[in-house]
Image (cartoon, rainbow, N blue to C red):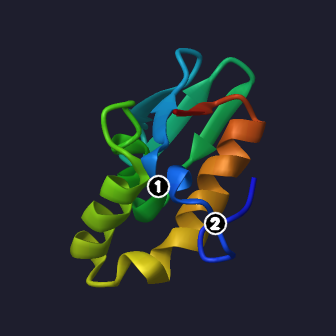
Amino acid sequence: MSKPGEGSAPFLYQLRPRLLPRARLEIDRLSQQPILLYPEGVMTLNETAAAILQLCNGEYTLAEILHELASRYEASPEQMQRDVYEYLCSLQDQHLVALLE
């Protein structure tokens, strides 16, 4: 699959990322920081990662997620697309996120 910004097909922007049932967002009781829990462990999330995953409910397309994040962080969707897509792909490789058509 090609990456956004590298001759990518428009269908990539229609993908609907969704957390898989084995993963869930939580707030750590001690640190009050966002975390991603899954059977093999815990992933501490920064603010941006948490914002991305909060939108990964299968309802929003990648394009809609990019536009929402761009408005939150005062950036263009084009500036964010590669990092967001690569992050989601890395979570997909760990079987934590599905990129649905």
Residue tagged 1: 13
Residue at the spot x=57%, y=48% of the render?
44
x, y percentage for residue 66?
Answer: 37, 63
x, y percentage for residue 47?
Answer: 40, 61
Residue tagged 2: 8
Alpha carbon distance from label 1 to label 2: 9 Å
Badge 2 density bin: few <14, some 14–19, many ≥20, Cα 10 Å:
few
> Is residue 21 shown above or below 97?
above
Residue at the spot x=41%, y=39% of the render?
56
Residue at the spot x=39%, y=30% of the render?
58
Q: Is residue 53 left or right of residue 11?
A: left
Q: Is residue 95 left or right of residue 62?
A: right
Element class at badge 1: helix
Dot 1 or dot 2, earlier in sequence: 2
Q: Is residue 45 visible?
A: no
Three-letter residue code for mark 2: Ser
Q: Is residue 9 visible?
A: yes
Viewer-nearest residue: 4 or 22: 4
Three-letter residue code for mark 1: Tyr
In the rendered picture of this protein, how many numbered marks are placed on residues? 2
Element class at badge 2: loop
x, y percentage for residue 8?
Answer: 64, 66
Q: Which mark is residue 31?
A: none
Mark 1–mark 2 contact, CB under 8 Å?
Answer: yes
Badge 1 density bin: few <14, some 14–19, many ≥20, Cα 10 Å:
some
> Is residue 12 shown above or below 97?
below
> Is residue 69 shown above or below 36?
below
